[in-house]
Image (cartoon, rainbow, N blue to C red):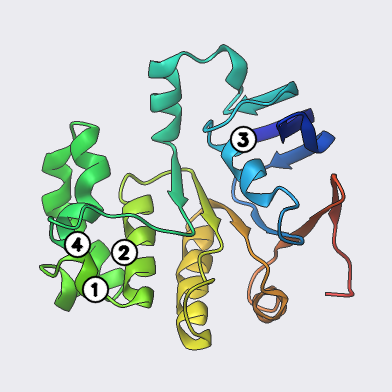
Amino acid sequence: MIELQNVSCGYGGNPLFSQLSLELAPGSFHFLTGPSGAGKTTLLRLCYADLRAQSGQVLLFGRDAATLDRDAVAMTRRRIGVVHQDCQFLDHLPIAENIALPLTVADRASEAAGNLPELLAWVGLQAQANQLPPELSGGERQRAALARAVIISPDLIIADEPTGNVDWEMSQRLMTLLVELNRMGKTILIATHDLTMIRSMKAEISARVLRLKDGELQQAGSEL
């Protein structure tokens, strides 16, 4: 599905990591952890074609990311749902319309009528459907961001610190939703610094825990 082979990437001549390899198999669940500044967000961006590797190869659904033109990148991203740490919305549109935007952009707006009510119920936002984004709490915004990421029924869901700005109870709720998606066959990649949350979820799902530190990606062991 997604494969990084001996990839190097950095900024301003300073490499964050080099010779890094990673494979995300269909239906797998991955946690990505590591210290601040280690390059977790950069690694995620490589996985959804928002950044190009300086060397090595990134394969997205079997295609070399370096060869994809703008249209091909857009088509590839329709198979990937992304939940950003700082989720942004169009503040003048109700949250239901914000969630439906990926379908609108993809000329699939007619699908929203059937999918949106069920999706709002799944994330528990039926009562907030007509509210504007500034009226939502942090947890509600994160659930809306997750709904927006999955409304196009992607094969892969990438979440960057999805629980970083919410309390423990809401963190658990968001993670439960992601586990449900994985059980539906979706591949999940979550970057997080919250080791407590990772420990709690390892009992719920068969997950691979990866640690990015000092430019190297290693599988974390039982110390977590």
Q: Which residue is mark 2?
A: 144
In the image, residue 108 sits, relative to residue 191, either above or below, namely: above
Q: Are marks 1 and 2 in contact (CB under 8 Å)?
A: yes
Q: Which residue is mark 3?
A: 46
Q: Are marks 1 and 3 in contact (CB under 8 Å)?
A: no
In the image, residue 96 sits, relative to residue 223, either above or below, namely: above
Separation (CA) of disc 1 from disc 2: 8 Å
Amino acid under disc 4: Ile
- Rendered location of residue 196, percent (x, y): 70, 81
Amino acid under disc 3: Leu
Separation (CA) of disc 2 from disc 4: 7 Å
Query: Of discs 1 and 3, which sits in the foreground?
Result: 3
- Rendered location of residue 148, percent (x, y): 32, 54
Q: Quadrant of residue 199?
A: bottom right
Q: Are marks 2 and 4 in contact (CB under 8 Å)?
A: yes
Q: Which residue is mark 4?
A: 95
Separation (CA) of disc 4 from disc 1: 9 Å
Separation (CA) of disc 3 from disc 4: 28 Å
